[in-house]
Image (spheres, rainbow, N blue to C red):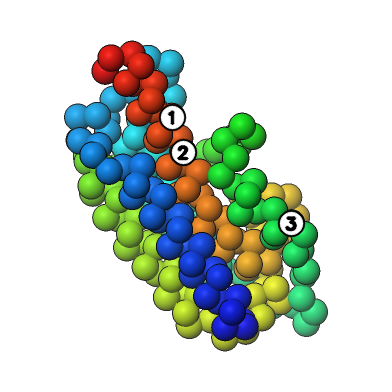
């Protein structure tokens, strides 16, 4: 992987985590477990989902197979950072990514995610091959995807749910919760 590309991916991974941290700032454990009047996930469930997804996508990184020629999806890659955080485009969560109530607190869920994110960062730092020559499957995108696409998904996913957390907080504030 080119050093410039590696640094861009690492920057995007940090940006996704930073967005999640910003959205969670000031969220107490009592607020984190509440559901909005409109239903949907709680803040805690959003963070648990982000952790589950990170760990699942790590399995995709580890199970990728190498091609002789790169799978070049640069047009799709260039759109992923923008589209990944676009909450106006609903994405159905695959069954395996649904929150299961495995964390009692949002701080425990976030700490677990941070451990997983550290593993992802280490993967990128240690990866020395062309990530477009390595392909795997994606839980939402049809067909084979290259590792850049998986890593970009991992980068934007927490930011997408940071926006969801902000939406939940706004709904609760409007409802006086």
CB-based contact (under 8 Å), mark 2 and mark 1: yes
User: Which mark lies nearer to you, 3 or 1?
Assistant: 1
Q: Residues within 10 Å of mark 3 (few under 14, many from 20)?
A: few
Residue indicated by mark 2: 163
Secondary structure under tag 1 reads: helix
Label 3 secondary element: helix
Residue 64 picture quarter: bottom right
Q: Position of residue 139 (x, y in %)?
A: 61, 49
From where the camera sits, is residue 98 visible? no
Reading the image, the residue beneath label 1 is 167
From the image, which quarter does the C terminus lie in? Answer: top left
Badge 1: few (under 14), some or many (20 or more) residues near its Cα, within 10 Å? some
Residue 107 x, y percent position in the rendering = 23, 47
Q: Which mark is residue 113?
A: none
Of the numbered discs 2 and 3, the one sitting upstream in the chain is: 3
Residue named by callout 3: 76
Q: Nearer the viewer, residue 9 or 143?
A: 9
Asked if residue 80 can be seen in this view, the reply is yes
Tell me the residue at 31%/37% (across/down). 44
Q: Is residue 153 above or below residue 84?
A: below
**Towards the viewer: 120 or 55:** 120
State left or right for residue 104 relative to residue 37: left
On the picture, is 28 further left or further right than 117? Answer: left
Real-space Cα separation, disc 2 to disc 3, in angstroms: 22 Å
* Cα separation between marks 2 and 1: 6 Å
């Amino acid at each position: 992987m080119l050093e410039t590309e590696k640094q861009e991916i690492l920057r995007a991974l940090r940006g996704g985590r930073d967005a999640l941290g910003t959205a969670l700032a000031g969220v107490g454990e009592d607020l984190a477990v509440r559901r909005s009047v409109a239903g949907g996930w709680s803040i805690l469930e959003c963070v648990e989902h982000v952790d589950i997804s990170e760990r699942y996508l790590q399995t995709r990184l580890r199970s990728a197979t190498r091609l002789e020629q790169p799978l070049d999806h640069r047009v799709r890659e260039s759109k992923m950072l923008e589209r990944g955080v676009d909450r106006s485009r609903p994405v159905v969560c695959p069954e395996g990514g649904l929150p299961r109530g495995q964390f009692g607190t949002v701080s425990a869920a976030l700490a677990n995610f941070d451990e997983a994110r550290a593993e992802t960062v280490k993967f990128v730092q240690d990866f020395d091959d062309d990530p477009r020559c390595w392909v795997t499957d994606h839980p939402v995108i049809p067909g084979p995807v290259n590792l850049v696409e998986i890593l970009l998904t991992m980068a934007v996913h927490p930011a997408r749910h940071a926006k969801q957390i902000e939406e939940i907080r706004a709904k609760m504030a409007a409802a006086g919760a």
